[in-house]
Image: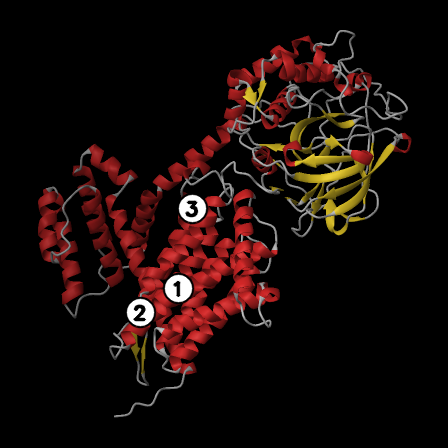
Amino acid sequence: MTGHARISIAAWGATVLGSLVLTPVFSGPFLFISAFLCALVTGVGVLLQNLRTPRIVVPIVQLLVLIELLSLFFLHSTMKFGLLPLKATAIEFNSQLVDAMDSINRFSAPLPQDSHLTLFAVSVISATGFLIHVIAVQLRQAAWSGLLLLIMYTVPAATVHGGLPWLLFIPPAIGYIVLLSAEGRSRLSRWGRRISGVSHLDAAEPVEASALGQAGRRIGLTVVAIAALLPALLPTLPEGVIGNGLAGGGTGTGIGASISSTDPMLDMGKNLKRGENVVALTYKGGPTGGTYLRLTALDLFDGNTWRIAPRSPGHKLNGGELTPPPGYTGDLTKVQQSSMEIDVTRTFRSQFVPVPYPLHSISLKRDWRYDAGSLDVVSSNGSIVGGKKYKLTSYDLTPTPDQLHDAITTGAPDQYTTVVPGKTPLDIKQKTAEITAGAKDNKFEAAVLIQNWFRSGGGFTYSTQNSKGSGMAALEDFLLNNKEGYCEQFATGMALMARIIGIPARVGIGFLPGTAGKDGEFTVKMHDMHAWPELYFQGIGWVRFEPTPSARVAATPNWTVASNENPTSPTTAPTNVPTTPGGKETPGISKPKNDPNLPSDSGTAIVDSGNWFTNGGAKVIAGGLGAVLLLSIPWLVRTLTRRRRFLRPPGRAGAEGLWAEIRDTSRDLGLDWSDISTPRQAGQWLTSQLPEDTHPAARRVARGIEALRYAGDAELELDLRDDATAVRQALWSRARARRRWRARLLPPSWRWYLSRGTNEASDLLDEFDLLLARLRSLILPKRAHTN
């Protein structure tokens, strides 16, 4: 294989491996298309070079071929005669790239599988591959191509929320190493004979491993090992170091919105702060006055982020009914249902389907599934709901305040929605207790008091300028200090307070009812996105509350009016979502016979405060044990080595081991042992460091080692263990206490074993190189040498 062909193939491989870092950003077959186009462009370059085409012509022809391929794959309808990409093709290409850039700037990763986004990804990867080929093959500067691979890595690393998986750093590193190795081999081959590497000669034939191969494999293994181990050893950097994790951070004027499955709360905040309020969906039917449409529920709070808890794969939709609402114990056949028809615009990109809660049935099939615990509908293959039109029926569950007042709230529907993070500040718990003091140990009354405190009594102001999020520090500042935020802070704040007083709580993400239009059609826009808390009451299930002030939501749900005759706040007026026509009370709810004021259902927060061990003590102990184990490695290495040396039988290996043990003991105790001294010189130095009664033992050891090394007729059964023990004990007894403790805990001589380990690893790699050389000599035919 010629040198330029080898480098060309390596450049193609480096491009493909480097493009793997874009998989968390883009979806669809972009990677396969890019690899295919880059292979064709590379093949054209190799062919032209084999035909002795002038060097300057090759990249021009490759660029024209790349343009033609991109046009055929993505813009075929704009090409003249179906073959020539002219002005119309260029205009359409520019238009699609503009759309792609806008989508990247507006939406969170992973981006949807749209044609303009696929074109963008393929164009970027193909152009990068073309430039790598030009730099590495035409300009013969393969090292500089690493900058292009680095750019491909840093872009998703700075834009993907939560950062890239650290393993994705390895493929670009391997690709770069392969390219450098191919370029170096080609460069050396132009000078004639290769520099010899590791070799092995036997009676039959010499077997030689390439020196360049040696260096390449060692550098490659080192880089890959660092790439694999460093992220695991270093603590995770905060997102603020390289960005906020968004694909575009400006407030800009967007033409759409997205909700990802990784961080719906973050995406909702982005959508609310956009300049242009475009239509997300329209719907007909449902309760009079419109209805909330929910996308999903966030039930896992770790003290930093509200997320979707781990779920099962879910149930497939086949156009039939869903499972009953979790927690509801009444007769669902007596509950009135509403039918709706929803039309989602293409500007709303979400894997979650907007539906009312609780959902009874939906017409979506095949690629959609639902979760029985939350009753949200989500894509099973990564597709989006934008452009979908579907019909559904939902239950009109409108419990009365009396039913909620009498409900028992001690039961938890799952393992997530009652968890109060251990780092919850005490002042938040105290404020919650202060707000709910008038509830008389009734959980529903306490929830109403919390809701009213947010809406009117707490002095809160609605504003989308709060960008601190809903982590614990941000919630503490919002609840107790600045008291300015939007629905994210109000919903998460009430959900946390509800958990503190023992009510299972989660956060719903979705849309407000929207604006009523002609013929009973409601229009829901992007700025109607909303978050609200959902609280769990046994026998009724999940119930929506509304703590967001009237500046955003005019009124609270009518079931959140306290059951006493004197409501705590005028904001508990009837909601803009009225009850189901035909009655105030939802039929069929079985009121619990148990006394809701049992000791287990008291107003005291049902929070498992645990003990010191469960609240971080276990981690402290584990960390301490890990640190002790790490610090004890030098001591352990020296102890095991010393024991092995003294257990060896008399002979050459045993004597050399004892001599090494005397050397290491001297170094551990801070004595200046010389590596260049002969055994006789070392023995004379030893006698100067030892008491007189151990001088004979030191001389016997030194003379024995001298005889073993230099006298051919030396006694191989020489036993020096007793003398070595005496010398070592004498050295130890004459050292200061501080030196002895250091020698025990952190013996300096152990660093020698690191060097020894490196050498042994190098020897192992040499054997691997020789094995590859032997295989190559067996598989590849020998080239005939001519004079």
Assign a secondary structure to mark 3. Answer: helix
> At 39% from the left edge and 57% from the top edge, which residue is drawn?
148
Q: Using the rendered image of the protein, determine whether residue 676 is visible from the camera's viewpoint.
A: yes
* Image side of residue 124 versus residue 144, left or right: right
Amino acid carrying mark 3 in the image: Pro
Q: Residue furthest front?
A: 87
> Mark 3 near mark 1, Cβ–Cβ under 8 Å?
no
Foreground pick, 644 / 504:
504
State which quarter of the image contains the C terminus: bottom left
Query: Considering the image in quadrants, where does the N terminus appear?
Result: bottom left
Q: Which residue is mark 3?
A: 231
Query: Residue 51: image x %, image y %?
Result: 39, 83
Q: Which residue is mark 1?
A: 132
Residue 334 against residue 675 in the figure, above or below = above
Q: Which of disc 1 and disc 3 is earlier in sequence?
A: 1
Closer to the eye: label 2 or 1: 1
- Labels 2 and 1: the sequence-earlier one: 1
Cα gap from disc 3 to disc 1, whole angstroms = 28 Å
In the image, what residue type sits under mark 1? Ile
Q: Position of residue 667 (x, y in %)?
A: 19, 46
Q: Secondary structure at mark 2?
A: helix
Q: Quadrant of residue 204?
A: bottom left
Q: Which mark is residue 184?
A: 2
Residue 486 on image: x %, y %:
59, 25
Circle 2: residue type: Gly
SS category of the residue bearing label 1: helix
Per the model, the C-alpha gap separating discs 2 and 3 is 30 Å
The structure residue drawn at horizontal position 57% and vertical position 33%, both measured from the top left corner, is 269
Mark 2 or 3: the one toward you: 2
Furthest residue toward bottom:
787
